[in-house]
Amino acid sequence: MSQKISRLNYQISITNSSELKEKFFSPNFCSNNNLYWKLCVKPTADEESYGVFIIPVPGPDEINWRNRSKLFIKLYAKEISGQTYNLYNNAFHVPADTSITKAYGCAEAFEKSSLRNGILLIGVTFENFENEGLTHYNDNNDDNVPLDYLPKNLVNAWKDHLYNFQPVDIEFIVKDKTFYACSSIISKRSSYFANVLSGNWAESTNNNIKIETDEILLPLSDNDLSTKIEKSNYQIKHRIEITDFTPDIFAIMLEYLYTNQINWINKDDESITIGLFCLADRYLLSDLRERAKMRIFSELNLTNVSEIMFGLVPKYEDLKDPILNFMIKNFEQISETQGFKNILSKSSDYYKFNDIMSELLSEYFKFQKGSNRKTNNVKVQSELNI
C-alpha cells in the first residue's frame, strides 16, 4: 500500500547567488507514490530576473498530471545573507489533464538586483490535495494556471455583455433538440462561430423568427422549458443546424463556452471525452481540444484502446504516440479483449487498418527484443555479483 504524505518539503541551496548565470537543476527527488521531480532556476533572456519552476520527471506510463494533481504545491525562493530574505512564494494546483511535459512556476520570480550574493534557497512544499474547498491563490502575476482560471476572452465576453446586454439571438438545431445562445458570448469564445455569425461562412441563415420565453437560461434549451412562454420576445438572427454531433455533447460545448467548465461524463455515467475532442477539433476550440486530448490519454484502458487506435488515430495524428506506446506495452492483454477481436472481424471498416496493424506489430516486436535484452543483462549482472 502506498504511503500518503500530509506535508513534504524539499530544498536546494546555491552559493554566491548573484553569480548564477545559467539554468540550474536540482537532483531528482521523490514525493509520495514514487513520483519524481526536480527544481529549476532559470535566468531570463536579459538576465535581469530569475524564473523558478517545478518539473515533473515522468514515469514510463505517465502522460499527464493525473496522480500528481492530488498534491497542492508551493514553490518558494529565499536568500540567506546575514538574515533571511523572502524572494518568492506561490502556491498552486495543477489540473489532472495537464500534459506531463509541462513545468509550472514563474518565469520572473525575482529580480537579479534583489540578490545580495548570499546563499540562495529554492524549495517546494507538497501537501495532500483532497479538500475540494481548499483555496487556490496566486500571489504573483506569473505563469501559473490556478484551478479556477478563467481565460481572458471569457472575461471580456461577459464584461461586454454586462454593459451592452444582448438577448439570445442564435438558434442551434441539434437533431431533435434546440438550443439558444447569445452571439456576443459565442463570438468572443470561438473564432469559428465568429466567422459563421458574421456571415463569412455559409453555415448559418439569417432569420427574423421570434420566440417567447418565460426565463433566460444561457445556454437555453427549448426542450427543457416546462411552462408556456409569457414574458419576453427575443429576436433570432441566426439559425444553425448541427447534424454530426449529439445534443448532449453539443450542450456540454455550449456550457464550456459560457463557463469554461467541462463535464466529461453524461447522465448515464459514460465518458463523452472522445465526442468532445472531435467537436472541439471541428469548431477550432484549441483549449477544449487539448484538455480533451489529455483526458483521452488518462482514460485509456485495455478495453477501449483498440477502437481509439484504429478508429480515431487515423483522423488525428497527434493522438498516435501515447496510444501506440500503450498498446505496445500491453499488447498481449489487449489482443485477448473483445474490443480488439471486434476490430479484426470488421477490419475493412477501418481505412488504415493494414498500416496501423503493420506499425503496431513492428513496434511491439522491437519492444519485446528490448525487454529481452534488458532481462538478459540483469541476469548476467546477477551472475557476476555472485
Image (cartoon, rainbow, N blue to C red):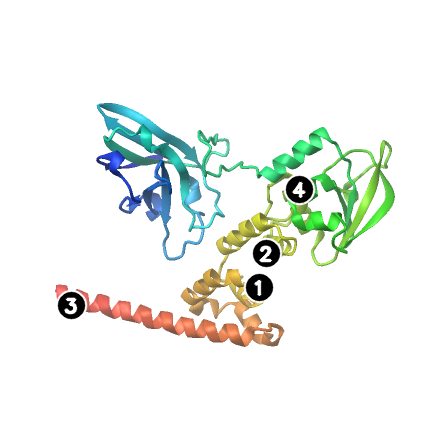
Q: CA distance from mark 2 to mark 3?
A: 50 Å
Residue extending farthest left: 386
First in sequence: mark 1 or mark 3?
Answer: 1
Distance from disc 2 to disc 4, alpha carbons, whole Å, reads 25 Å
Label 3: few (<14), some or many (≥20) within 10 Å?
few
The crowd level at tag 4 (other Cα within 10 Å; few <14, some 14-19, many 20+) is many
Amino acid at circle 2: Ile
Q: Are marks 4 and 3 in contact (CB under 8 Å)?
A: no
**Are there few (<14), some (14-19), or many (20+) residues within 10 Å of tag 2?**
some
Residue 84 at what x, y percent from top left? Answer: 27, 25
Q: Are marks 1 and 3 in contact (CB under 8 Å)?
A: no
- Foreground pick, 263 / 320: 320
Disc 1 packing (10 Å; few <14; some 14–19; many ≥20)? some
Q: Residue at x 82, y 43 (%)?
A: 236
Q: List the residue tagged with mark 2.
A: 274
Secondary structure, mark 2, is helix
Residue 318 in sight from this viewpoint: yes
- Residue tagged by mark 3? 383
Outermost residue, top side: 83
Q: How far is mark 4 from mark 1, CA to CA?
A: 29 Å
| Label 1 sits on residue | 312
Between circles 1 and 3, the one closer to the viewer is: 1
| Residue 2 in view | no
Type of amino acid at the residue the image marks with label 1? Leu
Determine whether the residue tagged by mark 3 lies in a helix, strand or loop. helix
Residue 188's disc number:
4
